[in-house]
Each structure stands twice: as C-alpha cells, then as structure tokens.
Amino acid sequence: MGKSSKDKRDIYYRKAKEEGWRARSAFKLLQIDEEFDILKDVKCVVDLCAAPGSWSQVLSRKLYVPTKAANLTRDEDLPLIVAIDLQPMAPIEGVTQIQGDITSIRTAELVIQHFRGHRADLVVCDGAPDVTGLHDMDEFVQSQLILAALTIVTHVLRKGGNFVAKIFRGKDISLLYSQLKMFFPAVTCTKPKSSRNSSIEAFVVCEGYNPPEGFEPRQLYNLLERASGAYSDLDCCSSWLEGPNKIMIPFLACGDLSGYDADQSYPLPVHETTDMEHSVYQSLAPVQAPIAPPYKTAKELERKVGKFDFST
Ligand code: SAM
C-alpha cells in the first residue's frame, strides 16, 4: 500500500523511518520522557497496547540495550519489559510479548506471572480503539481502555511508581481525572510536540502511585465488567464530580517547542543528481511491516480473485 504525499511530508513519519522506529509514536514517548524523566531508574515496565512496537523499541533502546551492553549485570538483573497487544508484534530485543486483551483479567494475571514477584516501576499505555468518528462513542471506548489499563496498574505497579496513558480530551474527561487522582497525587495532562494539534489525543502522566487505604484491585474489574454490560457505571460515579471532588489537572506541552511542528508539512529533501530536473525524494521502506494486519484476509482474497470492483 503506497503512502500519500501528506504522510511523506510529515516530518515525524520520515524521521521515524530514518531512525528505525516502527511508528512515529516513538517521538511522543521520547518527548514525554524529556519533560518528565519517567524512564529514570526503571527496571520493570509494562507497555500496554504496544503494537506495532515503537514505544517498546524506546523502552528497549533506553533501558535494556545499554544495560546489556555494559555487561555488568546477571541476566536476572536486566530490565524487564513486558508488552501486550491484541495484535501480534515482531520481536524486539529484551521485550517479552503477550498477545491479549487488556480489558481481560487473564491478561493482568499473565503480566503478574512474568514479573516473578517484582512490581513494575512504570506502566505505559498508548491504547486506542478503532476510531468510528462518532465522538461520544470513541471517547467512551477510549475511557474504557484507560480504565482497563488502570486496573492492570493497580495489580502490578509498585507504590511510588508512574503511569502514562493516552487519553481523548472530550467533555467527560473530568471523570477520568477524578479516577486517576484517587490513585496518584500528581496527574498532568500533556501534549507532545509530535502529536498533531488536529487530534484530540493527549497523555496523562500520573506520578507517585498511592492507592487509597483498603483499596482492593479487584473492585476495578467489577467496574469494567459492569460498564461493558447493559448499563454504565458512569451514573453511579458522577457524584465524584461534585464540589471539592471536581479536580483541576495542570496541562503542559512537552517536546522542544521550537522543534518540528506535527501539523506542518515540510518540503521533501531531494537527493541531488547531476540532472537537477529529475532529483527525487527516496521514500524509505517501512521499518517493520505489520505481521498480521487486519487487512490480511482482504489482500489474500485480492491475490486469488483479482481486484474487487465495487461499482457494480
Ligand atoms: N504504542 C504503539 C507503538 O508505539 O507502536 C502504538 C499503539 S496503537 C496507537 C494502539 C494499539 O492499541 C493497537 O495496536 C491496538 O491493537 C491496541 N489495542 C486496542 N484495544 C486493545 C485492547 N483491548 N487490548 C490490547 N490492545 C488493544
């Protein structure tokens, strides 16, 4: 599938290929780290909704590869990186992969098993549902993903650990902020420079995990199960948003603010030839093509029966 010229003019798309990142999203995590230093001293980390794997690559390159190269540590002292997604992912050095649904309790159990009694210092989640274009629906499904991520957090994160998650800044975002503030004293909403202004996505950086006394992690699963059933628990939670419970969250842009602008198109660099009129931009191949893309069956059918004609 060819990429449109708009994709090619996207500077982060091009830079991702040049630097060997599987997706431009890598820059979002790098820019969040520049601002909040979330990777400092991290030994155990969970990457939720990780495919195709550019955040896992960042974790591997920043945490695993340098430790391994230093050759000073035993295997069991190497950083532990566990990545989960519904989709399979091509391997990444030092990253253990689990194919699964983060809204299922089974997935949380699998993550815990991998940690062999350790707790995570950091959980990141870049999860996004297939966007329908129906804003209320998309925001609701996105908030369910974060609730699922938070549920895993409550099972695996150590006290004082951090959590970073993608959010859609819709009109009901205060409810999510209130939920997060119950578990983290510091919650900041951030928009990395590489995230397009035209997108409602932003990221919450939640620092210093400190669950309420007596909190039982299984409670959140009940909330998830009920919210995905016939009725939503949002009604029963809306009272949290009254009076002092309505929480204000600081907003912070991150990444070099004088650097590349994700909403700008930049001219293509051309490779000079002796014949200047025919200088062309050399588009790089994808760093890692999806190994089981959702359109795989359609492609196979197309190979067998030729192109579909939808006009008849
Ligand atoms: N951070 C990734 C990277 O840097 O390559 C990109 C993540 S992509 C924007 C969103 C991912 O969320 C998709 O791969 C999708 O399969 C995953 N996802 C959506 N719902 C999920 C669920 N319930 N459980 C696990 N993964 C899910």
Image (cartoon, helix red, strand yellow):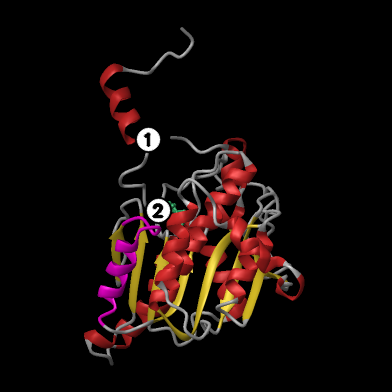
Q: Which residue is depicted at the point 28% across and 29% down?
A: 300
Q: Residues within 10 Å of mark 1 (few under 14, many from 20)?
A: few
Task: Look at the numbered disc 2 and give the secondary structure of its residue.
Answer: loop
Q: Quadrant of residue 85?
A: bottom left
Residue bearing mark 1:
295
Residue extending furthest toward the right: 243
Give the numbered dot on residue 287. 2
Q: Is residue 126 visible?
A: no
Amino acid type shown at disc 1:
Tyr
Q: Position of residue 176 (x, y in %)?
A: 61, 64
The Cα–Cα distance between marks 2 and 1, rounded to whole angstroms, is 19 Å
User: Which quadrant holds the N terminus?
Assistant: top left
Q: Which residue is depicted at the point 42% across and 47% down?
A: 285
Query: Does residue 138 appear to the left or right of 219 in the view shown?
Result: right
**Ligand 1 quarter of the rendering:** bottom left
Q: Which residue is depicted at the point 23% across and 89% down?
A: 74
Give the numbered dot on residue 210. none
Q: Which residue is depicted at the point 29% across and 78% down?
A: 115
Name which of mark 2 and mark 1 comes first in the sequence: 2
Q: Is residue 126 above or below residue 272?
A: below
Query: Does residue 222 appear to the left or right of 181 in the view shown?
Result: left
Q: Position of residue 3 (x, y in %)?
A: 51, 38
Q: Position of residue 153 (x, y in %)?
A: 44, 73
Q: Which residues are magenta?
A: 100-116
**CB contact under 8 Å: marks 2 and 1:** no
Q: Is residue 35 above or below residue 302?
A: below
Q: Is residue 168 above or below residue 77?
A: above
Q: Residues within 10 Å of mark 2 (few under 14, many from 20)?
A: some
Q: Quadrant of residue 66?
A: bottom left
Q: Nearer the viewer, mark 2 or mark 1?
A: 1
